[in-house]
Image: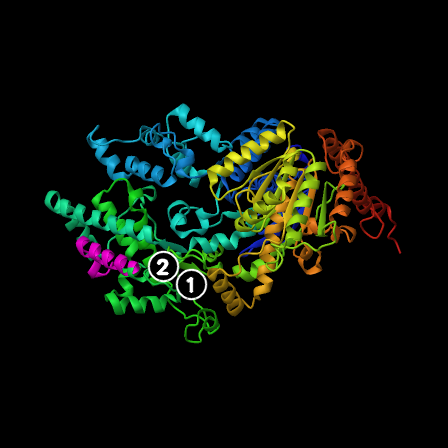
Amino acid sequence: MCDLKRTLDATVCSSALHFLSGCLTQFSLGTLRFGDAVRDWEDSVLAFLDCLIPTGACISVSYLLCRSYSQQFYPARRKLIYCSRTVPEIEKALAELKRLMDYRISQAETEEEKEKEKSYTGLGLTSRKNLCIHPEVSKEKKGKVVDARCRDLTNSAACEKGRADPGSVELCDWHENLGKLEPGNLIPPGIWTLADVLQYGRDKGICPYFTVRRMMPFVDIIIYSFHYLLDPKVAEQVSKELSKDAIVVFDEAHNIDNVCIESLSIDLTRPMLDSAARSVSKLGEKIEEIKTTDAAKLQDEYAKLVEGLQDDVDDTDGFMANPLLPDDLLNEAIPGNIRKAEHFVAFLKRFVEYLKTRMRVLHVVAETPLSFLQHLKDITYIERRPLRFCAERLQSLIRTLQISRLDEYSALQKVASFATLVSTYEKGLAPSSYNSLWNLSFCKTLPSGFLLILEPFETDNATVPNPVFHFTCLDPSLAIKPVFERFSSVVITSGTISPLDMYPKMLQFTPVVQETYPMTLTRNAFLPLVITRGSDQVAISSRFEVRNDPAVVRNFGSILIEYSKIVPDGIVAFFPSYLYMESIVAAWNDMGILNEVWKHKLIFVETPDANETSIALENYRRACDNGRGAVLLSVARGKVSEGIDFDHNYGRAVIMFGVPYQYTESRILKARLEYLRDAYRIRESEFLGFDAMRNAAQCVGRVLRGKTDWGLMVFADKRFARADKRAKLPRWINQYITETASNLSTDMALTLSKLFMRTISQNPNENQTGISLWTLEDVEKAQAKQKALALEAAQEREAHNDDEDEYGDGGINDDMLVDFDLDV
């Protein structure tokens, strides 16, 4: 990976392409020929590179390599904001970038060049929980508790009081030590992984989290989660000061539409409302206490609110940020009926009681924000305008009262955010198609992109009420629109972002550059197989009508048994849902299939609980390492399918049991499908098929994580044999699915699998090294060849120029003109 620095020098050619709003790119694994990498940003020129990029984790480092190259050798060094989905992916990208920069420093030819390389700075940001080194706070297991305790020790009011009167309040020494350092020099230049920042904080006695937060305006690259840009509640606090000319990259962005929707959606449950009611009572008690001890505080706050003044608050102090998108924020004074603290508490109490009353119904209710607000006004006389300021007013009150342990007020924060969102995005009514879906009468106007759904039961068959009030965003383009408007260069990339044309439709943007790159390997490192029937020739499928058929269940089990016999080390099996996996595993147990699998490999199961899944993963890897072998039963869209690498012996085969469609009876999904159809003309079947195939590709893609890696991809469902389904798979997978391998029975698939494993186990050096896997010697040979060609071309140009000088005037040189006899 790192042996390419000089190779890049000889392969730059420029093209006048200019990023306007977004660049949509699909990266494949393997040897890549890709553009969109190095750019002369001042002249609006995009430069292309031809180079070999390793696979797996280096999908991420491809952009980092090219961006760091352009930042080093072009004067205008624009910040790179690199977004990924999970903490392991962020740490992996930082580690790759650090390795790259270390190599470039070691290969620098002059001291000046070396210092230039060393000045390049990159940091990663994650939650307080992951970066806290306080001996007491870091022991907390819940992120909300860590955040709350951290704010108690670091908020500006506590720091001011503690510095004025040492010992009066407890402060964080690590946070205080940061204040003694010069801003912008809190950490030396270089690439710092999360582990490096933690260790540096321990060594120097400074807080790692606030070190990264305060260094963000000064670094060349910042790597963090999608939510820090897409979720307005987080972006307002973390990313507000980032320069507008930065380049934004969303890596692993195949599910970016779901992240956008989640950032503007809120779910309320009955326990949350009970907790919010208790928090409101605590606020009332605290106000009464302040009135008797320090009434001036409340009077000062009221005076500021009357004048429409905003407190200058440090972003790190914020108990909660405004959940609205930037364009929807109001620069107005808070309404008079909620300015006084006691009036606002009474307002909150009334609103919470209204929500509790709404949750007592035993039938499904779906309504638009406008309908909800009208009903709220009719019952409680609460107007829309004060609701819009609910989140902002609560933050002001919390700050005035200087309340600690803010994690106890998280439910009230959600209620306030719910109030602000539902009152802001109330425009527009549901389309007429909702009539058939909800059996409700609405006006025939365009949808607003938001819907409220009250579900009294967890499932349709449940008898005990467990109501959930969903405020659901249906339009993912709303959350990403501010990013497109703010930043001029945005790149969306993933190895499974296929088909490409669906994303511009859903996110409502026009890509300036849209590319798909195939895989180019000298030998097939993976074998995709489509099994459509069992050895008994009974078709297999996870369709609802046949998914519990004993013959189908038995054939699925037969596939797992046979592959556990022939595949070494680890096998990962994916199911469409937890419910289906539970029913299949129970049936396999009754049929004795699990006992047969246990004879060859251990079995581990992914569960919805993150801690249980982490333990299962650890033991699965241990079984693969010690030679016992293991099978991991997992779920599409679960933790294992996102961000967990099963490289080499950890995943020699991935089996996808069934097509991972979403649960189509979900009312939220139905509402979203209706919205996509009416607003963007995206058919329900089109979106469902697209979503299922991108998740299937994400699952099977776990098997191949490097150029030296290999494995089997097994699609066990007859529907995968259809051309329209396979066409939605990424090109780098689809190009290796041959006609022979697209309609197999179990025994035929086993025969091809055995042949593939015998072939792949041969020594790869004779046909791999020097072609698609380069050593340092190969890079040096390529450089020497390029230099020789460049020298030859330069000599030819020089000879051509000499010829032109010799006969510059019609073939007669100056000496000949002097001697020419002009006498006539």
Magenta segment main secondary structure:
helix
Q: Are marks 2 and 1 in contact (CB under 8 Å)?
A: yes
Mark 1: amino acid: Phe
Residue 394 image label: none
Identify residue for label 2: 421
Q: Is residue 670 left or right of residue 134?
A: right
Quarter of the image that includes the N terminus: top right
Looking at the image, can residue 5 be seen?
A: no
Local secondary structure at mark 1 = strand
Task: Return the x and y of residue 681 as percentages of the image width and height.
Answer: 56, 68
Q: Which residues are magenta?
A: 333-356
Residue at the image point whose x is 72% and y is 40% from the top: 525
Q: Is residue 55 left or right of residue 170?
A: right
Residue at the image point whose x is 21% and y is 35% from the top: 161
Residue 70 is one of the magenta-drawn residues? no
Frontmost residue, 538 versus 67? 538
Task: Return the x and y of residue 107 as percentages of the image width and height.
Answer: 63, 28
Residue 450 image label: 1
Q: Is residue 35 left or right of residue 230?
A: right
Q: Name which of mark 2 and mark 1 comes first in the sequence.
A: 2
Q: Residues within 10 Å of mark 1 (few under 14, many from 20)?
A: many
